[in-house]
Amino acid sequence: MNRLVNIFSQALRAVIALKLRSFFCILSIAIGISAITVIVAATEGAYQKAFDIVATFGPDSILIVGGAEETRGIARREKTLTLTDAEAIRSAFGTAYMVVPMSNVRNVIVSYRGNRYQTSVVGSSSDYSLAWTWPVVEGSDFTEEDLKRSANVALIGHETMRELFGEENPVGKFIQVRQIPVQVVGVLLERGASVGGGNLDNRVVMPITTVMKKLQNEPKYVAVLRVRFEDQENIDRRVEELKTFLRAEHRIPDGESNDFQVFSSKDIIKFLVALTGSLVAFVGIVGIISLIVAGFVLANLFHLSVRERTREIGIRRSVGAKRQDILYQFLGEAVLLTTAGGLCGFLLGVAASALLQYVEAFPIHFSWKAFAIGLILSWIVGIVFGLQPASRAANLEPIEAIRS
C-alpha cells in the first residue's frame, strides 16, 4: 500500500512540476470531453423532452391536420376537414371519448383599455382544457351553450393575460378581438415554450362557431381535429383506421394520396429525435476526433518527457525501483492529467450547453451519466495512449539510462 502511495505522490509531483506539458494535455482532453458531455446531455434532454411531449400531447391522442403532406406550410394548407368529419368520427369510433375540431387565426390584434397585443386566436369546441389536459387556473372553460349561440367568450393564455391585464384579474372583463367585444371566462395554466421554441401561452381560445362565423367567415371547414381514445394501447391501429375512414368519407380514389395527415405522440417524438440527432451526430464526430487527437498529443508529450527524464528514471531504477513502479508512475501521471482534463471538459460542456440552450432553446439535461461517461472516457484515453510511453520508460536499463 505504501508503495502505491509513493508512486502516486511521485506522479502528482511530476504533473505539478511539468506545467507546460500538463497544460496542453489537460486542454486537449477537455475539448474532446466537452463535446462528449454535450452529446450525452443532449440525448438525455431529448428523451426527457419526449416524455414531456407524450404527457402534454396525450398518449391516447391523435391529431388530424387538413391538407396533403406535400403542402406542409400551415398557411398554405388546403381546407379539407369539416365539422361533419368530426361528427362522423364521433359516431363511428365507440372508443373515441373526445373529438375536438379546431381552427386557428394568426396575427390577430387584441386590446384592453389601450393595451394592444398581437396573438393567435384558436377556435375550439367546449372542454378545450380537457382535450389538451391544460387546466383552467382562473375562471372556467366555455360551455356547449356558448358553442350553440356563437358566444363572444374566451380563454386566454398567461402571456396574453400579462400583456393585456398586468396584475389585474382578467376573468369577467371584456377584450376587443378585431373590434369584437369578447368576455374573458378563464385563464389557462402557464406552459412555456413548445418543441419548436414558440410560446404556448400566447393565445386566445374561443368557441369554434364564433371564430368560424365572426373571424373567418367560414361555414364549413376546420384546420385540425383532435381525437382522444379510451383504448390508448391500440393507438397505432386507430391511426390506420382513421386514415381508412377519412379516405372513404372524402371519397379519395385508390392510388391517390390523402388530403389530410394523421399524427400521434410517436410522430412528434420522432421529429424531436431527428432534430436532436443532427446535432448529436455532428458533435459526436467532433468529440471522437478531438479525443483521438488529444490521445496522440498526450502520447507524444509523454515520449518527450521520457527522453527528458531518462537520467531520473535510471537513478530511480538503480536505487531499487521496479519496472512496474516506473510503469505505474507514468500511467498514474497520464490518468491524473486526463482526469483533470475530464473535469475541465465537463465544466466546459456545461458552459457550451448553456450557450446552446440560449441560442437554440435546445433540450439539454445533465445527470450523473454525462459526468461518469466523460470521466471514464478520459481514463480510457489516459491508459490507452499513455501505456506505450510508460512501457518504454519502464523498460529502460538503469546503467544505460544513467550514462545517457
Image (cartoon, rainbow, N blue to C red):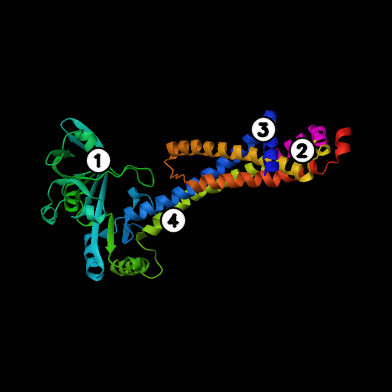
Image quarter of the N terminus? top right
Q: Which residue is under mark 1?
A: 158
Give the spatial CA distance, label 3 vs label 1: 53 Å
Residue 126 in magenta stretch: no
- The CA span between labels 4 and 3 is 44 Å
Residue 205 in the figure: left or right of residue 60: left
For badge 4, the amino acid type reads: Lys
Chain-order first, disc 2 or disc 1: 1
Looking at the magenta stretch, what is its main secondary structure?
A: helix
Stretch in magenta? 297-315
Image coordinates of residue 372 in percent, x first then y, are 54, 47
What is the number of callouts on the image? 4
Q: Earlier in the sequence, mark 1 or mark 4?
A: 1
Secondary structure found at label 2: helix
Marking on residue 150: none
Identity of the residue drawn at 44% across and 43% down: 362
> Is tag 3's residue or tag 2's residue first in the polypeptide sequence?
3
Left or right position of 395 against 121: right
Q: What residue type is labelled 2?
A: His
Q: Nearer the viewer, mark 3 or mark 1?
A: 3
Q: Nearer the viewer, residue 375 or 249?
A: 375
| Rendered image quadrant of residue 294 | top right
Quarter of image, res 100: bottom left
Q: Can residue 107 be seen in this view?
A: no
The residue that mark 4 highlights is 270
For disc 3, the marked residue is 22
Callout 1: helix, strand or loop? helix
